[in-house]
Amino acid sequence: MKIQKEEFNRMIFSRINNLINDYNLIKEDEKIAVALSGGKDSVLTLHALKNYQKFLDFDLIAISVDEGIEGYRSHGITSAINNAREMEVELIQKSFFGEENFTLD
């Protein structure tokens, strides 16, 4: 079965919205933080939660952590920055080196 992009997105966001509703995962006026690696899963989560703000008033922020793994995180961090900016979501950026003075390398 082939599905058009718009229909696929509608189905995914509908499922996510139903899941949040069915399990009462988010309440009015809560602050929700998304761990935003910049990969497809966390970016989808950010977009879905931003979309869900149409139905419920809650604060949404994103947090990105640079583990300092050489050649691994730069594309993810760029994606996190771009998606947070596009969605108008505050992005808190941290790094292992900045916080703990070491990297995972």
Image (cartoon, helix red, strand yellow):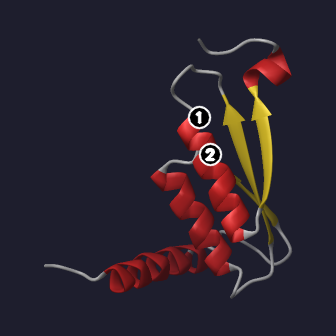
Contact flag, marks 1 and 2 (Cβ < 8 Å): yes
Q: Can residue 55 be seen in this view?
A: yes
Crowdedness near tag 2: few (<14), some (14–19) or many (≥20) residues, C-alpha within 10 Å: few
Residue 53 in the image: above or below residue 77:
below
Residue 28 in the image: above or below residue 60:
below
Q: Which residue carries the number 2 mark?
A: 78
- Quadrant of the snapshot with the C terminus: top right
Q: Is residue 35 visible?
A: no
Report which quarter residue 103 is drawn in: top right
Q: Where is residue 87 in the image (x, y as percent from the top left)?
A: 69, 69
Which one is nearer the viewer's eye here, 75 or 17? 75
User: What residue is at 48 percent from the left and 78 percent from the top?
Assistant: 13
What SS does tag 1 mark?
A: helix
Which label number is shown at residue 62? none
Q: Position of residue 93 (x, y in %)?
A: 78, 41
User: What residue is at 52 percent from the left and 24 percent from the top?
Assistant: 71
Q: How many numbered circles are shown? A: 2
- Left or right relative to 54: residue 101: right
- The amino acid sitting under disc 1 is Ser
- Left or right relative to 46: residue 40: left
- Quadrant of the snapshot with the N terminus: bottom left
- The amino acid sitting under disc 2 is Thr
User: What residue is at 62 percent from the left and 79 percent from the top?
Assistant: 51
Q: Which residue carries the number 1 mark?
A: 74
What SS does tag 2 mark?
A: helix
Q: Position of residue 81 (x, y in %)?
A: 68, 51
Which one is nearer the viewer's eye here, 56 or 68? 68
